[in-house]
Amino acid sequence: MKVVTFFIVGLVVHVVFFISIFDIYFTSPLVHGMTPQHVPLPPPAKRLVLFVADGLRADSFYKPDVNGTIRAPFLRSIIEERGTWGISHTHVPTESRPGHVALIAGFYEDVSAVAKGWKENPVEFDSVFNESRHTWCWGSPDILPMFAKGASGDHVYTHTYPAESEDFASTDASKLDTWVFDEVKAFFNSAKGNEGLFSRLHEDRNVFFLHLLGIDTNGHAHRPMSREYLENIMLVDSGVSEIVSLFENFFGNDGQTSFLFTSDHGMTNWGSHGAGLPSETLTPLVAWGAGIQAAQRATEHPYEDQYQQEWKLDTFRRVDVNQADIAPLMSSLIGVPIPLNSVGVLPIKFLNNSPHFKAESLKANSLQILEQFKVKMTQKKETTLSFLFTPYPLLTGSKQQDFIRNAKSLIHNGLYDKAILLCVEMITEALEGLSYYHTYDRFFLGCSVVLGFAGWTSYVVLVILKTHASLRKPPGNRELMSERGLGRVFMCMGLAITVFLLVQDSPWTYYIYCLLPVPVWYSVVKEIGTLLDLIHSAPSLPLCKCLGYFVLVTFGIELLVVSFFYRATLSVGLLVLGLWPLGSGLYVKAKTRSLTWFLSCVCLALFPLMPVVGREPNVHLVTCAAALTLFNTISYLVSSRSLSPLQRKDRQLFVCQMIHVALCAYVLTSTHFSLQLKQGLPLFNQLASWTTLVLSFFVPLMSSTRLFHRLMSILLSLVSTYLLLSTGYEALFPPVLSWLMFVWINIEQEAMSTGAFSKTELFRIDFSENIDITKIRQLKLDDIRRSYFFVFFIITAFFGTGNIASINSFDPASVYCFLTVFNPFVMGGLMMWKVLIPFVIVMCTFETIQVSTQLSSRSLFLIVLVISDLMALHFFFLVKDYGSWLDIGTSISHYVIVMSMTIFLMLLSIMTHILTSKRVFMGKKMKVHFK
């Protein structure tokens, strides 16, 4: 197979493997075709008012300050006199859109929404707003349109402020909440002179939704412990008090209004959210008004935590709920069907109604979830052969009928408590059954992907042995079966799989995952002769040395896998790498470089030990990073002056880039202090930042094509952008990493026993010159070590200063030099580029080592491909169907990271081969020297 063809096929295979994880674990759980369930009794309320204080933590709301002062006195009085309170437990990801979906639609994040960037749901869903007669909403343009879009009919009315108002650099983000309260007051004042609107407002089943974003914005900009965040809570409490009075006066104190106050998610101490820390998942819930149980004294304390004591609420009954339980609670209060896709369980302890009403409401809740179970079961049964279909054993058709009959009988006989217990039990079993059918095909698809993965990895290993190993071929004919006969066997297998999937009416993606292993394993079996050659050559190989490399690489891969969960493992690995010259005997002939290598490894090993999140901004460290970069550059220019003199044009370019680095440090510092003084983002700083980002892609192309000159220019351009995206110690990471990379290039020359470039020749290597293919050396076992070093440094580049698999490790303050108005796509793109900058530094270094050690890029990359594939396969096995979504999501994100890295490397290899194919014959066979 030609080189380009091989890489293109490999790219396609890896893209399929990459997409498979989303098709297996990120499919929408939503189903359609259910029948709405009504409660045959009058509801306690005609209207519902929902307040959602975006980003409000439970402890910030409930806990008195150090002086014992209550931050929300009005809502505190509600808790103590008129309503029921508790904690609403959110689910990962703790973001605004999924939180509001759980509150209003009753189901947790539809993970298929990742394809929409979490901005909207790709699958239509039902909600309390949709089931209402009318819904009026005020708040953010990022949240409200989603529910208006999903509503059937034209009865959801939204009032939003401009998106530009969501500015993290705003002098007062609480104005977002003030805008909502003022708009609601103006709306009701206008309704007094509008007979049609006045009439609609007095109808039943109406919902009023107030989305209050100021607390979240202040939390991001100033942190949750800041004066701005805490004062915003007081402003919201005052605003809620005014709105409650407004409703009571407008509707004549008719006692037909229910009020709910809660939050979509919390926030960490460092001003982010998205993961599963208690500060992110614990949100307040206060309910009062029509149909809500009044405040009661606590007769028992069922919760083991000490929150009630800390919040001085231990004498009042606390009722905790899951966030999705709020949707059926709101439906029950105003008498609308529970949203069809809801998985929430009605919290009857909040209700102040008859036992009959509670039992009927919970029965409707259980039937609504049972309807989803039936639809899911029917869908799966229709796409599975009857003799292969395994129904959920705990909820067969007869058991469903028994439940419905028993529930009706108990309610009819007045045994409401027993009916409630039966309904709760039924809901539990139906939810487990929903999960069972949603994950029904995961094992089957997982086995297909693993089979394909194992086949591809085996094929790459055989290609390495066949192309680069001098194996002794045994005499005689080795063919166990002709190529044509082998092809017929695998063609029959593919045809059988196709018929099987066709009969089951499987989705088209199933054909890809199930058929991919067929050609892959055909290629493996076709190359079985290479494996026989290896077995025949085994007596002549240094088996002990080969076994030693195998053990070390296996241990190294496990070390890398563990590092995804425990970053400190990278520090251990770097210390071990630092001792490599001592163990390999390199220290004897290159003491200075070996000591420099060890020192640079130790310095880099400090970064994984530092905190990922919770860092306070420290612009002084960013300034130190700029100074360190300039020091490294000057030291290089001085040391290389005699070995590789600079042209005048190159000298001028380096001076300009160094001045630019200093300017970026100034821009970052001035932006930080300007935002602290609430003066906004200076226009000059914003223009300078965007200009720096654009120029960083082009300026290195203007530099000399000499090896180290080009690398230094790339480094200066990347560091300039990285400084603008830094807030603290992470700015020091690229200069230290670059130092280690330069030492790595030099020490690899010492590791080469013969044929390597001398120090003088190393400085004079020119990327633009044609390479003499006669000097391209043969592959050695030590190249396995080089490939592993590369993978290790890539992982270190990813996780050295943070955990990109953790949503809340990103600080929005990182992009404040570029923009402060909330824009998730632009902000996400900038932070992703920040993550990739160290990656690019390592990639450029590895390409340099390939050139300087006189080895073709394909040779080393094949080994890198095997190592990364083995890591990805390891993470695929770590993904389980059980455990919290956070645990599953973490393993999936690690798999995605490794697969993304591999795909990126393959794309780079294809581009490199195309660009260099005229200069270097990359497909030339080379022999491994095992000695």
Image (cartoon, rainbow, N blue to C red):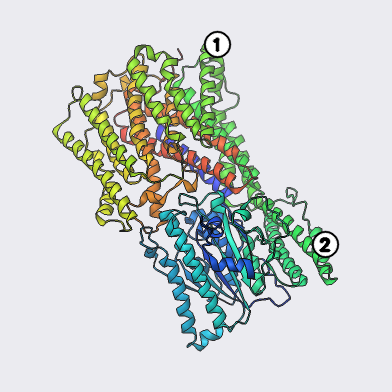
- Residue for point 28% across, 50% down: 670
Element marked by disc 1: helix
Residue 197 in the image: state x and y as whole percent.
Answer: 51, 84
- Residue for point 59% across, 31% down: 485
Which quadrant of the view contains residue 487? top right
Question: With respect to residue 57, does 237 lie above or below?
Answer: below
Q: Specify whether 417 is left or right of 126.
A: right
Q: Which mark is residue 539?
A: 1
Which quadrant of the view contains residue 906? top left
- Residue for point 56% across, 15% down: 536
Nearer the observer, disc 1 or disc 2?
A: 2
Residue 514 in the image: state x and y as whole percent.
Answer: 59, 43
Assess disc 1: are there few (<14), some (14-19) or many (≥20) residues with their C-alpha within 10 Å of its C-alpha: few
Element marked by disc 2: helix
Question: With respect to residue 145, does 903 lie above or below?
Answer: above
For label 2, the residue is 402
